[in-house]
Image: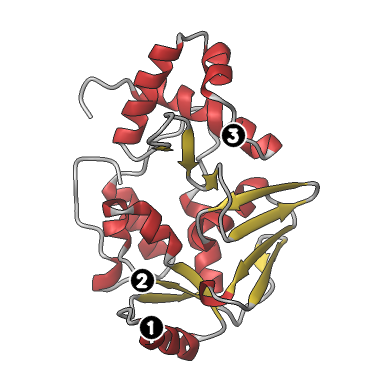
Amino acid sequence: MSGVDPDALARVHHAFIRPMLDTGRMPTRERAADELNMSLGELDDALAALAGIHGVVLDPHDGEPWVMHPFSATPTATWVEHGDRGWWAPCPWCAFGIAGLKQGKATIHARLGGEHEPVVVHVQDGRVLETDLVVHFAVPPRDAWNNVHRFCASVLLFRDRDAVAAWCARHGVAEGGTLSVRQAWELGRDWYARHADPDWRKWSAVQAATIFERTGLSGPFWHIPPADDPF
């Protein structure tokens, strides 16, 4: 986006992401403005610009950060546990991103297919222990920001590919893309690896496509068309 200072947006992004990662709580706009020595109006302008490049989802009522991937400031169906801390994640992709940022041992709590059966995934020593699970994406990632909440809600864990097919038939959802839980871990780890960095930048479309290819995600469903804007 022309006219937007990427270094300034990175500082605003970091002022929210770092405390969230360290404490499990999203700071208020007032607190972030004080930390950045900005007026609330200046911060709100920066947050609006950050939302414009999909770096944050703002609450439409009060303008507070609602989702700053891989974190959600409000409850979701996916919970990441790490020591005495915990975070809500918008989806398993984000949950693996949080586990990658924290490193060490993490436990992800979710429900298979977003239904009644709980599932627990452990990440330890840089690998996922429950290797038989899969993750299904109902919406192509290139279309995520058409409705990011719907996109995140439809990224779900399943026992296997047969369970994905049965779920799609049951709910009238077209089968999308299914990857192994190991691939989902690698995708989350690599995608969010720099999200807590002070000099964070959104991935370009080319960078995003490279991460997908490196994770073994290829074919029309995973295709990310070239673009000038951040992905």
The color scheme shown is secondary structure
Q: Is the residue 189 above or below the residue 163 in the image? A: above
Q: Which residue is mark 2?
A: 138
- From the viewer's side, name the closer residue of 199 and 76: 76
Q: Which residue is mark 3?
A: 26
User: Residue 140 vs residue 110: left or right?
Assistant: left
Q: Is the residue 215 above or below the residue 35 in the image? A: below
Residue at mark 2 to residue at mark 3: CA–CA distance: 29 Å
Look at label 1 and name its amino acid.
Cys
Q: Which residue is mark 1?
A: 168
Sequence-wise, the earlier of marks 2 and 3 is 3
Look at label 2 and name its amino acid.
Ala
Label 3–label 1 contact, CB within 8 A: no
Question: Looking at the image, which residue sits at the far right?
Answer: 84
Identity of the residue drawn at 45% across and 13% down: 40
Identity of the residue drawn at 64% across and 57% down: 79
Any part of residue 190 in sight: yes
Sequence-wise, the earlier of marks 2 and 1 is 2
- Label 2 neighbourhood size at 10 Å, few (<14), some (14-19), many (20+)? many
